[in-house]
Image (tube, rainbow, N blue to C red):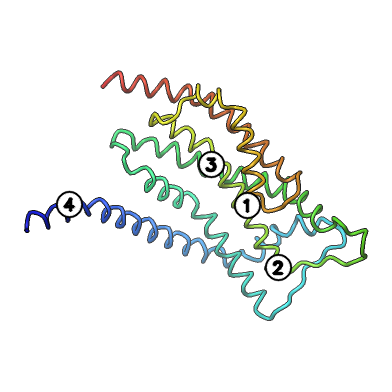
Amino acid sequence: MRRRKRQLNEANLPLMEHLKALRKVLVISAYAIALGSIIGWFVSDQVFAFFARPVLQLEGIKFITTTPLEPMLVKLKVSVVTGMTLALPVLMWQIWSFILPALKQTERKYLYIIVPSSVLLFLGGAALCFFIVLPLGIGFLMFVGGGAVESTPFLTKTSYLSFLLAFLMTFGLVFQLPIVLLILIRIGLLSPQTLAKKRRWAVLGMVVLAVVVSPTPDLVTQLLMAGPMYLLYEISIWLGYLVARRRDRDLASY
């Protein structure tokens, strides 16, 4: 009986270790976001003014407030978003450390490459979205069909902020594609040759993904998402040859 109980405890040990690791990730991430949000509170007005540029550059659109709590809620949301942005390196480190727990001590150095690359790709995707895709998307959505019935377009700050964050998060996460592909190549689940042979299917998958995850239904936004995804896919293939060559060299040295 004792032996069986000990075997059950040993079987549950990996699960408990994962839960402890997850708890650590959540606690550290929460502290990082909270600290960043405190800083973000003091600059939230300036940050929202920056966020509002794509709308303010369009003629005939104004922001309105529909509830007494809306200005405070928007300020809180912008503070948290600013906090998450400031804490992004910490968040990425915690996420990738949790996703890749099987890295050996000698391979932990790859986190120093993965984490900065992941942060830069996320910010790059968000920047592409904010400066190029978002103005086109808002201009199209706010004025499409406007000739049928004359109307004055208004936006609440809350609805715009939710729309904006959906855009930024989608593009930031989609731009993590090279990191995921290179990790799969590194651990031997993929090869650059396979990626090169499956280009046609990859293009089809990217178009479908862009249609599914795009916050707007317009074709322009979906193409502006699928295009950079394919470019990142091609870059991943060429970088994959280097990663695969390094992996084979490391395996041969063992």
Q: Position of residue 240 (x, y in %)?
A: 49, 26
Q: Amino acid at mark 4?
A: Glu
- Between 77 and 39, which is closer to the camera in this rendering? 77
User: Residue at label 3?
Assistant: 176
Q: Amino acid at mark 2?
A: Lys
Q: Are marks 1 and 2 in contact (CB under 8 Å)?
A: no
**Comparing labels 3 and 4, the label whose residue is closer to the camera:** 4
Q: From what the image shows, is residue 168 above or below residue 43? A: above
Task: Determine crowd level at label 3: few under 14, some 14-19, many 20+ residues with C-alpha closer than 10 A.
Answer: some
Give the quadrant of the N terminus. bottom left
Q: Position of residue 143 (x, y in %)?
A: 85, 57
Dot 4 or dot 1: first in sequence order is: 4
- Which SS class for mark 2? helix
Residue 157 has which mark?
2
Q: From what the image shows, is residue 152 above or below residue 101? A: below
- Which SS class for mark 1? helix
Dot 1 or dot 2: first in sequence order is: 2
- Which SS class for mark 3? loop
Residue 10 has which mark?
4
Residue 168 has which mark?
1
Q: CA distance from mark 3 to mark 4?
A: 36 Å
Q: Is residue 252 left or right of residue 157?
A: left
Give the quadrant of the C terminus. top left
Residue at image location 58% in from the left, 46% down from the top = 123
- Between 75 and 148, which is closer to the camera in this rendering? 148
Q: Is residue 247 left or right of residue 217?
A: left
Q: Are marks 2 and 4 in contact (CB under 8 Å)?
A: no
Q: Amino acid at mark 3?
A: Gln
Dot 3 or dot 4: first in sequence order is: 4
Q: CA distance from mark 2 to mark 3?
A: 29 Å
Dot 2 or dot 3: first in sequence order is: 2
Q: CA distance from mark 2 to mark 4?
A: 53 Å
